[in-house]
Image (tube, coloured by chain):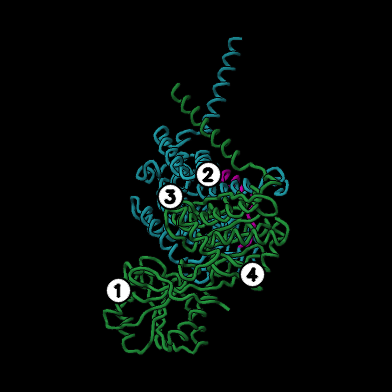
Chain colours: A green, B cyan
Amino acid sequence: MRKKRFIFLLTALLAVAMLTAGCGGGGEEAAEGDTIKIGFLGGLTGAHSHYGIETLKGMKMAVEDINAAGGVLGKKLEIVEGDHGSNSSEAANVTQKLITQGVTAIVGDPTTGITKSAAQICQPAQVVLMSAGAVGTGVVEIGDFIYRDVLLDAVAAPAVTKYLKEELGWGKVALVTTTGLPYSESLTSIFKPALEEEGIEIVAEQSIMEKDTNFSAQVTELTRKDFDGVIFTGYYTEGALFMKEMRKQGLNQVMAGGDGLLGKELYELGGNAVEGSMVYAGFAVDKETAAGKTAEFIEKYKANNDGNIPDMFSAQGYDAVMLLADAMEAADSSDPKVFKDTLAATKDWEGVTGTITFDENREPIKSPVYLQEVKDNAFVVKAVIPIS
Amino acid sequence: MEAIISTFTNPYYLQVASIMGVYMIAALGLHLITGVTGQFSFGHAAFLSIGAYTSALMSLYLGTPFILNLLVGGLMAALWGVLLGIPSFKLTGDYLGITTLGFGEIVKVVFINMKITGGAGGLGGIPRETNVVVVYSIVVLAIWGLYRLQNSRFGRALLAIREDEIAAESMGINPLLYKLKGFALGTFLAGVSGALYAHLMQYLNPADFGFSRSFEILNFVVLGGLGSIPGTVLGTSVLTLAPEFLRFVREYRMLIYGALMVTMMIFRPYGLLGGIDFGKMFRRYRAQRKSMKDKKAVQG
């Protein structure tokens, strides 16, 4: 009986401890006055933690820079972190919590799905949400408080196509799509009209499946066609294996594709077969063209991270905070209802990832596009294509 | 009502309370299947997703009233429950566990590949209809219904099947029919819970209804105490609130959560409230008091 009572007490104690701890975390009143709070929404743990951690690193650097220069509207910026463990049903709770903690804007989530889920909460709560990674469709359509500072395929693919035609002289291409993969299907639907516009002929269209490993049938089909290169809209694993099969069957063309191909697995798997293949992305470290802000950002990141170079997510996280801060300054207000309009009017804004303009639908138009090439088992910037 | 509540508390607490209630409904459904009837179902999240997608699509494309969507979501889940249950229950042993395990994966893959569900990109823009009042009204309704059910001939038949199927059959209970009815009811509750979830989160993604979600719900039921309604409610509350309130310890959150579960299982192997029947306790207490009174009356 005594033992039972002891366990009961222990459980009760735990429950009470948990409750009080919870109250301490959730019941914080929004401190008005001295700071402007910006929320971070992302996974610091779980499957997408890499994206979240990098975004937060970039954000922290931006906040440091801003506060060192005197803050925004005379107030210091403060980041409120919201880790949802890469779990989208927890993300709704975390977003709600950030809003109750009095944030004026939230930067996140790096993935499209969770951004959509968080946007449904931010829009009615009238808090600005700036995603530093969501590239899928149907994000900013949710409402006028929702923004993103990413490179959209709809902007990048036509520019890359133009480059392929004008600089590399491609006239005929083979288009390879991973069916059943939303990313690949949507990218194909963007590339098709772009190719047509540039007068590049699609001589062959092949479809593959995700997790396929044998592409001999599709490649045999291609050996009978004459083309200058392959447009590959899928992910790196299939891309690497597809190129290997092409080399095996004696085809020497290179491929070009979106950031789905961007991963060291591309050359680790593909080896010599992917040498010369091209991938575009919204940010890349290029020592030759990096100047001003970008060079400073890269140097500072390297100094804080044991010499590692920043990736797209940290750079976009940095830009997201800077964009918000500049919009607040320009609007002379940290009220989301006010500065969201100045944010929408952003034009040719210069950040570390390039310039950003929001179009009439509040979609970002980013310039430039970084076209990278695989060279000796590394991605090297081949061209920096400006978007006009 | 919603407005009155929201003046006393903040939206974050309301959100957490709502999601807790939604999980409670799902857990109560599994409680009937696993706790009362003793059938292991590892694909409860699949029924949740069927209810969620059915009701969400009805809201988006047909614009039907919320209550109807909830009902149809639940019925659709129950329909698939029956279709899955018929072949599985014809076999003796734990075949339901295996079929539901497979069913869960199939449903997920189907939703990923269907155009109308938005595929892997997810389904967004679902109107927010779920609120705390609706959720807890349904929770109360479900608890009351299950309590009545468990103390009826039907409920006792289910318990008999759990304890000994052959003995139950020899007493004139048709196990197939009873198990099927129990399973249909359990999956109905899962469907309703899914429908509430869809209209609370306003965004659905097939990845949210995977294997781990099924096990999460099973955890609620097992940790609270198999076969106990208060146990299921308590288990759900503890396990949904713990990760939320442990957020301040960051990376150690899941560690503490895990340790909490291990400790509980060591000290209370039958769950927090396993083997405790509040109804019986109350009756015993009353009987004790009555006998004391009687004694006093005799003495006096």
Q: Tell whether label 4 touches label 1 (CB within 8 Å).
A: no
Residue at 62% across, 48% down = B12
Q: Which residue is mark 2?
A: B247
Disc 2 to disc 3, C-alpha distance: 21 Å
Helix, strand or loop under label 3: helix
Q: Earlier in the sequence, mark 1 or mark 4?
A: 1
Q: Which amino acid, mark 3?
A: Phe
Q: Which residue is mark 4?
A: A362
Residue B28: horizontal and vertical position, in percent?
51, 46
Is A340 a magenta residue? Answer: no
Q: How many marks?
A: 4
Q: Which residue is mark 1?
A: A272
Helix, strand or loop under label 4: loop
**Residue toward you, B79 or A348:** A348
Residue A335 is left or right of residue A252, and the answer is right
Q: Which amino acid, mark 4?
A: Arg
Is B139 a magenta residue? Answer: yes
Q: Nearer the viewer, mark 4 or mark 2?
A: 4
Is residue A164 something that shows in the picture? yes
Q: For label 2, count other residues whose C-alpha is less than 10 Å away and answer few (under 14), some (14-19) or many (20+).
A: many
Residue at 72% across, 49% down = B3
Classify A360 as above or below B200.
below
What chain letter is assigned to the residue under label 1?
A
Residue A2 is left or right of residue A325, and the answer is left
Residue most extreme to the top: B300
Residue A5: horizontal and vertical position, in percent?
48, 24
Residue A260: horizontal and vertical position, in percent?
43, 69
Residue at 46% across, 60% down = A310
Disc 3 to disc 1, C-alpha distance: 45 Å
